[in-house]
Image: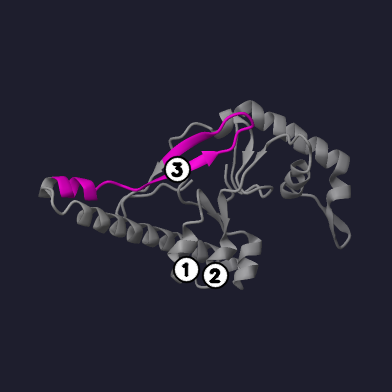
Amino acid sequence: MSDYDVIPTWFPPDTDLPNDGRFTSYQNHVPALLSGRQDEWYRMADTLLTLAVSKGKEKAIKTGSEYLFSDMFALLELRSWNPQPMIFVNYVGDGEDWGPKVKSTDCATIRKFTVAIHMSHRAMDVLGLHINFRGVTMTKASERFWQCDAEAQRGFAAKLSNETSTTSTTTTIAAVRRRPRIKIWWKNSTTTTTAMVTAPPANESRTML
């Protein structure tokens, strides 16, 4: 499950649930992207509600005469538990790292966004952009990501072309068409699993999360 302000990047769409389906948050305690088996969702729903009833007011922030206790505050509290009742990793990039002109963000910066980009309220504030422009900003950020992807593929293809210049034309074309692959390591309490993500070509249609 993802927030509506999350843009998928290299998230492998056909991988099994990471960590054997144990409940996992992909931006530390920020619930921007979450996964888990059905029983894990039920377990965590019960955990969150129990926490809200028992410590909600204590852990909440006061806004005027009201108290605010959200799922993010709940996960922040759960992250301090030992042992932790879920898995916390940090594979979602923060949108504030893009800089105010998202369409000209350096491609090296964009490579840090392993599985997704989160254009949160805080990110928009840091970028100095009104929250009403979040949709437009997300569109520009997504376009820039795929532009950098295309540039990376051209560089990859050129390198392969040079390396295979002595081979036949057919072999060279086949090599150039190979796509770069990215390895993502999923954290697990007992084992570590990997998912190989193949970078799609620049003109291929994309499916949003």
Number of numbered discs: 3
Callout 2: SS: loop
- Residue sitting at x 74%, y 43%: 79
Is residue 13 or residue 196 the one in the foreground?
A: 196
Give neighbour class at mark 2: few <14, some 14-19, many 20+ (Cα, 10 Å): some
* Left/right of residue 42 with respect to residue 115 in the rendered view: right
- Hey, which residue is sitting farthest left in the picture? 168
* Left/right of residue 105 with respect to residue 149 in the rendered view: right
Earlier residue among tags 3 and 1: 1
Q: Nearer the viewer, mark 2 or mark 3?
A: 3
> Looking at the picture, which amino acid does disc 3 mark?
Lys
Residue 189, how many percent across, how many down? 64, 32
Q: Nearer the viewer, mark 3 or mark 1?
A: 3
Callout 3: SS: strand
In the rendering, which numbered label is found on residue 99?
2
Residue 143, how many percent across, how many down? 41, 62
For the record, the magenta segment spans 171-196
Vertical placement of 200 versus 194: above or below? below
- Residue sitting at x 13%, y 52%: 166
In the rendering, which numbered label is found on residue 105?
1
* Left/right of residue 133 with respect to residue 163 in the rendered view: right
Callout 1: SS: loop
- Residue sitting at x 42%, y 39%: 196
* Left/right of residue 180 with respect to residue 15 in the rendered view: left
Earlier residue among tags 2 and 1: 2
Is residue 162 or residue 186 the one in the foreground?
A: 162
> Looking at the picture, which amino acid does disc 1 mark?
Thr
In the rendering, which numbered label is found on residue 183?
3
Residue 178, how many percent across, how many down? 27, 46
Residue 193 is covered by the magenta coloring: yes
